[in-house]
Image (tube, grey):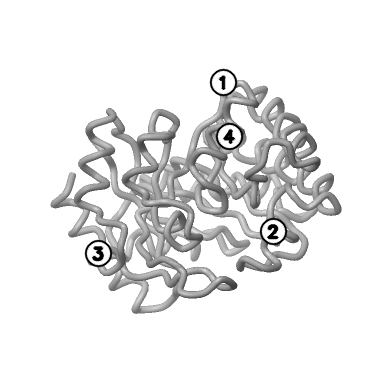
């Protein structure tokens, strides 16, 4: 049966990082490392031990480690392709190293899936940058597989067909998808329910997030509380069930404070009815 969890943003104050899980009454999460964690001093043995202690004490299960990376990052349609993920050549080398360190850190925590945004993967497979992107991803994949993990692409910055092609070009083994249905809308790439017809077999974790299509050619669409956007969660959950998905539904609400807690609690009730 599908399990409901939420995102936990990792910080050096580990105990505080996991407080929200108790606040909203959940025991499953994706652990998210930001650019600070990705830096050379972020992934320490001491931090791993503290996380393991909190998870044991609180009965927390981490389903996926979401790995961030350092360097410039602009989440839009203009500078995004130039700054995000492994597509920009100038940031590729050190971000590959950061993914490997994240994989090693996740292994210490017993986490068998790690996810990230790969960037705006070239839609045209004849793009001269495409082979380099695939080579970078293959470099990461070898390391992740050696650590007994799967590497998950978070959806959004590429069409479903482009993402499936990249997975096929990498050989499929050890690869999966972290489905963020809202991102497919926010980036204007696909209807998330229909996207499952293209890549549903690879879905290993799901962000329960809602949103709208873009309204201009420069900025992403607007994220919304679950149930108030255009994802159509009744249809999405039904489709996930029909293809045999029974993994995590990880609520993501990209705001903070009491409003975030309220929206997560509301999402929990909606998802409980649907699953």
Q: For label 4, count other residues whose C-alpha is less than 10 Å away and answer few (under 14), some (14-19) or many (20+).
A: many
Say which label, 1 or 3, has the lower sequence index: 1
Q: Secondary structure at mark 2?
A: helix
Q: Secondary structure under badge 1?
A: loop
Q: Are marks 3 and 2 in contact (CB under 8 Å)?
A: no
How far separated are the C-alphas under marks 4 and 2? 21 Å
Measure the alpha-carbon separation of dots 4 and 3.
29 Å
What residue is rendered at 74% in x and 60% in y? 83
Q: Using residue 4 as the reference point, say whether residue 170 is left or right of it.
A: right
Q: Secondary structure at mark 4?
A: strand
Where residue 232 appears, as percent x and y from the top left, is 25, 56
Q: Looking at the picture, how far across and down is residue 155, in whole percent? A: 50, 48
Spatial separation of the CA atoms under disc 2 and disc 1: 27 Å
Q: Which residue is mark 3?
A: 227
Q: Nearer the viewer, residue 183 or 68?
A: 183
Circle on res. 151: 4
Residue at 26 percent across and 61 percent down: it is 267
Question: The N terminus is located in which quarter?
Answer: top left
- Given this view, does label 2 or label 1 mark the residue nearer the observer? 2
- Tell me how far mark 3 sits from mark 2, CA to CA: 30 Å
Q: In this rendering, which labeled residue sits more in front, label 4 or label 3? A: 3
Please tell me which residue lies in front, 175 or 62. 175
Residue bearing mark 2: 81
Which label was assigned to residue 173?
1
User: Label 3 neighbourhood size at 10 Å, few (<14), some (14-19), many (20+)?
Assistant: some
The residue positioned 41% from the left and 49% from the top of the image is 29
Mark in the foreground, 3 or 2: 2
Q: Quadrant of the C terminus?
A: top left
Q: Earlier in the sequence, mark 4 or mark 2?
A: 2
The one of 28 and 198 positioned closer to us in this rendering: 198
**Real-space Cα distance between discs 4 and 1?**
10 Å
């Amino acid at each position: 049966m599908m399990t409901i969890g939420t995102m936990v943003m990792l910080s050096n104050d580990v105990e505080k990082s996991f407080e929200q899980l108790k606040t909203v009454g959940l025991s499953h999460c994706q652990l998210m490392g930001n650019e600070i964690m990705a830096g050379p001093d972020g992934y320490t043995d001491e931090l791993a031990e503290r996380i393991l202690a909190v998870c044991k004490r609180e009965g927390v299960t981490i389903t996926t480690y979401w790995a961030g990376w350092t360097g410039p990052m602009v989440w839009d349609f203009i500078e995004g392709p130039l700054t995000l993920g492994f597509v920009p050549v100038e940031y590729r080398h050190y971000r590959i190293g950061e993914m490997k360190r994240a994989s090693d850190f996740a292994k210490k925590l017993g986490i068998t899936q790690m996810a990230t945004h790969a960037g705006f993967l070239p839609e045209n497979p004849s793009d001269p940058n495409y082979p380099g992107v695939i080579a970078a991803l293959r470099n990461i994949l070898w390391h992740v597989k050696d650590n007994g993990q799967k590497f998950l692409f978070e959806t959004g910055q590429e069409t479903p067909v482009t993402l499936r092609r990249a997975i096929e070009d990498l050989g499929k083994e050890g690869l999966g998808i972290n489905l963020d249905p809202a991102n497919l809308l926010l980036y204007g790439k696909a209807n998330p329910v229909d996207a499952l017809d293209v890549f549903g077999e690879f879905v290993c974790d799901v962000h329960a997030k809602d949103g709208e299509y873009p309204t201009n050619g420069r900025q992403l669409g607007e994220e919304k509380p679950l149930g108030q956007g255009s994802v159509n969660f009744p249809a999405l959950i039904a489709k996930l069930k029909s293809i045999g998905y029974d993994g995590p539904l990880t609520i993501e609400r990209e705001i903070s404070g009491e409003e975030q807690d309220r929206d997560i609690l509301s999402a929990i009730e909606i998802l409980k009815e649907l699953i």
